[in-house]
Amino acid sequence: MNTIILKTASRFLLPLLLLFSVFLLLRGHYLPGGGFVGGLVASIAFVLHAFAYDLESSRRLLRIHPGYLIPIGMSVALLSGIFPVVFQDLPFMTGIWYPDSVPVIGSIGTALFFDAGVYIVVVGSVLTIIMTLSESS
């Protein structure tokens, strides 16, 4: 599409949608939300940008091929599960929490890092699928 309204709206909506996706990520281990929903919202932000401009400008905005995000996110999620086994002799995927609360984020623990890994995997997967499909058509 080549409308000025969509281009202007996407310029304002991209940062807002990315900020909202981080909000969903951070509140996910307390209330509904988390890495999956936040990753979908972040992917929607880039898809909206691709609709408004073109696929190449969205790729330049990402600066990394979205397929590379999948193993990075899987590594973060796996490390959050292995951390209790290695450092505290607890079962795999046991939640470990930092005792103090961080003002904006809340409690920091392995669940947050697992959600961050899921967030990265979802963004990488969805954008890889959508960009591959839009290239072929």
Image: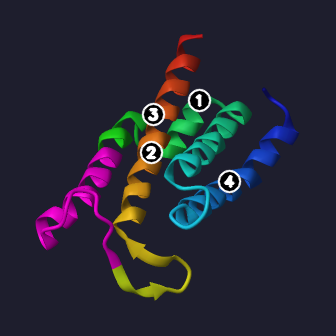
Percent across and percent down for residue 87 are 14, 71
Q: State the separation of the CA atoms marked 2 and 1.
A: 12 Å
Is label 2 in contact with label 3 (beta carbons under 8 Å)? no
Tag 2: residue type? Arg
Q: State the separation of the CA atoms marked 3 and 4.
A: 18 Å
Per the image, label 1 sits on a secondary structure element best described as helix
Residue under circle 4?
17
Per the image, label 4 sits on a secondary structure element best described as helix
The residue positioned 53% from the left and 11% from the top of the image is 136
Query: Taking 130 as reference, is 66 above or below it?
Result: below
Q: Nearer the viewer, mark 4 or mark 2?
A: 4
The residue positioned 28% from the left and 57% from the top of the image is 93
Residue under circle 2?
63
Q: In front: 125, or 48?
A: 125
Percent across and percent down for residue 14 are 68, 51
Tell whether position 125 is magenta: no
Tag 4: residue type? Leu
Percent across and percent down for residue 91 are 20, 60
Q: Which mark is residue 55?
A: 1
Q: State the separation of the CA atoms marked 1 and 3.
A: 16 Å
Residue under circle 3?
125
The residue positioned 28% from the left and 63% from the top of the image is 94
Per the image, label 3 sits on a secondary structure element best described as helix
State which region is magenta. 72-97
Mark earlier in primary sequence (2, 3):
2
Q: In front: 74, or 28?
A: 28
Quadrant location of the N terminus?
top right
